[in-house]
Image (cartoon, rainbow, N blue to C red):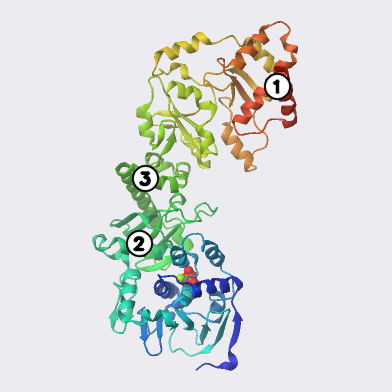
Amino acid sequence: MSDTANRETHSFQTEVGRLLDIVAGSLYSNREIFLRELVSNASDACDKLRHGALTTPSLVEGDQEFRIELALDAKAKTITISDNGIGMNRDDLMETLGTIAKSGTSAFLENLGKGDEKDDISLIGQFGVGFYSAFMVADSVDVVTRKAGEKEAWLWSSDGKGEFSIEPAARDERGTTVTLHIKKDAKEFLEEARLKHIIKTYSDHIGFPVKLGDETLNAASALWTRPPKEITEQQHTEFYHHTAHAFDEPWLVMHNRVEGLVSYINLLYVPSTPPFDLYEPERKNHVKLYVNRVFITEDTKGLLPSYLRFLRGVVDSEDLSLNISREMLQTDPKLAKIRTGLTKKVLGELKKKANKDAEAYAVFWKNFGAVLKEGLVEDDGLRDRILEVSRFSSTSGSDLTSLGAYVERMKDGQDAIYYITGTDAEKVATSPHLEGFRAKGVEVLLLSDPVDEFWLQHVPEFEGKPFKSITRGAADLDNIKSDDAADDKKDEDDTPTLGSLIAAIKLELGDAVKDVRPSKRLTESPVCLIADEGDMDVNLERLLQRHGQLQGGMPRILELNPGHAIVRKLAERASRDGACSDALLQDAAHLLLDQARIADGEAPTDPAEFGRRLSTVMENAL
Ligand code: ADP
Ligand code: MG
């Protein structure tokens, strides 16, 4: 019986109130997911207590058999979901069900309305607000709960209309009972057959028995302990959703039992869409660690390298100690063994997939390639394996290429793997630096992930071929045979003498450039900027400047296209007497430098001067 004198009423935190309005008023057809959410919470509560009992065994004294019980009362029109998990005390209730803002609430609200309603609401669990889905089918909800190890029990009730109440209650044992007072239009859920079917569909993978009377409705064994052949695709999907708080389909399932010095089972999933926190600075892992079926941690440091943080699922080992602290676990050599085994396994599976179905692999690569490439910097030991499964855009076409395939296509006389880096894939693909390589049919890798600059510092070569930036150092295209031998010849015949022009530009630009020289890499544009051989590459410098890790930069080498009409005419002009004091040549020198900067996506050195010079030159031309 409730004790009205001690009842406290509270308003829901504003955003929870809004969420409830939407959920309660929804005509969403797939309302059955409320049961998945409540059973999932009950299962989490059992997991938490089982974990807590490792250090405080008295918490489970007298009742060690975790279970989730459903009950139906057609007359009273109620469904109850009970568990003997960890339970909640008053503070827990206040914190979890109502007043304290949960980050997921607003994220979920934002997400609502983006897609169609069906998808939107089923995402509720992903945002950590699954409990409130109860209000899709219930007019009001009562939660009676008692925390393990405590004596008091509490009743939380709400009709989902802005307020909830908390008051002392009675419960003989630890755990939580959620009672749903079913809405008139949701009577279908009061049918036993319907409930059984829902449990089978969504909650079969739950590791605790879900019972209705004497009958256990689910398989009640942890999914990963079952023989892989017996697990259906649907069960994998449901388990993945439950364990990862995700709602896409797994792109890849890896389920293995490894026996050895350290034995373990892994059931890992690669998502088909990128999780939202992929690029957060913590680079947290999300694979759950179990020791002999007992849940230990969600984000065990040391279980997997950060560059595999897109993985979801569980790893369960009997060989880790249950009684050591999480901190000590991180440095357990057995955990390191598991980590190595898992990492190799994952890379091996990715390789298989990449070889089998390039198109499907391209989807994975687009989602997670940039994360995986972090491993090229961090994991010396497995670098070659990571390179093997890495894919790149290149000038050879729209498909991604492997490094192996690139090397096979290398031209006679080509001794390096050419690449260009930048922050914008489209700009990289149209950079003037590529012109000469395109003309000669020499393939260039187009790299536009920020991490590319960094792994290239660590990976000098692939299969004996060095990586070479086409925006740094000399372009040694002369030794490479182009498809059309006449082209090679033409280049040499056509080169005009640029000596005087180069001298004039150098004089005018002074320290603003490191050198001025004829270019071998340009065929259409008049100019480009190049980093000197020993200097930092252009894109890396820009990247470091943007992150405030570098101030200023090295002067660049300005390369002139000897075949370009502007360059030819300027060269002629410079060869005439007294050209050094020619005002037009002086303006042209600055304009050429600025043009090269602009082609690289940078601003002119001095925009006002740039404007003035451009006007003068145009005026003279008109
Ligand atoms: P999530 O499960 O993602 O945390 P929910 O909205 O489903 O989000 O649940 C909110 C919180 O309420 C849970 O994190 C948990 O702390 C608490 N809770 C809900 N159901 C139970 C339960 N049966 N036993 C113990 N705690 C529960
Ligand atoms: Mg939940």
Q: Is residue 347 visible?
A: yes
Is 520 above or below relative to 443? above
Q: Residue at x 51, y 86 (%)?
A: 155
Upstream in sequence: badge 2 or badge 1: 2
Q: What amino acid is labelled 2 in the image?
A: Thr
Q: Tell me the SS state at disc 3.
A: helix
Give the class, few, some or many, for how many residues have Cα within 10 Å of label 3's Cα (few <14, many ≥20).
many
Viewer-side residue, 601 vs 224: 601
Q: Is mark 1 within 8 Å of ligand 1?
A: no
Q: Identify the mark nearer the N-term, 3 or 2.
A: 2
Per the image, label 2 sits on a secondary structure element best described as helix
Measured in 3D between alpha carbons, the distance from the residue under mark 2 to the one under mark 1, in whole angstroms, is 65 Å
Circle 1: residue type: Met
**Disc 2 residue: CB within 8 Å of ligand 2:** no
State if disc 3 and disc 1 touch (CB < 8 Å): no
Q: Residues within 10 Å of mark 2 (few under 14, many from 20)?
A: many
Callout 3 touching callout 2 (CB < 8 Å):
no
Q: Which residue is mark 3?
A: 361
Q: What element does badge 1 sit on?
A: helix
Is 562 or 253 nearer to us in this picture? 562
- Tell me residue 340's x, y (percent): 38, 50
Residue tagged by mark 2?
237
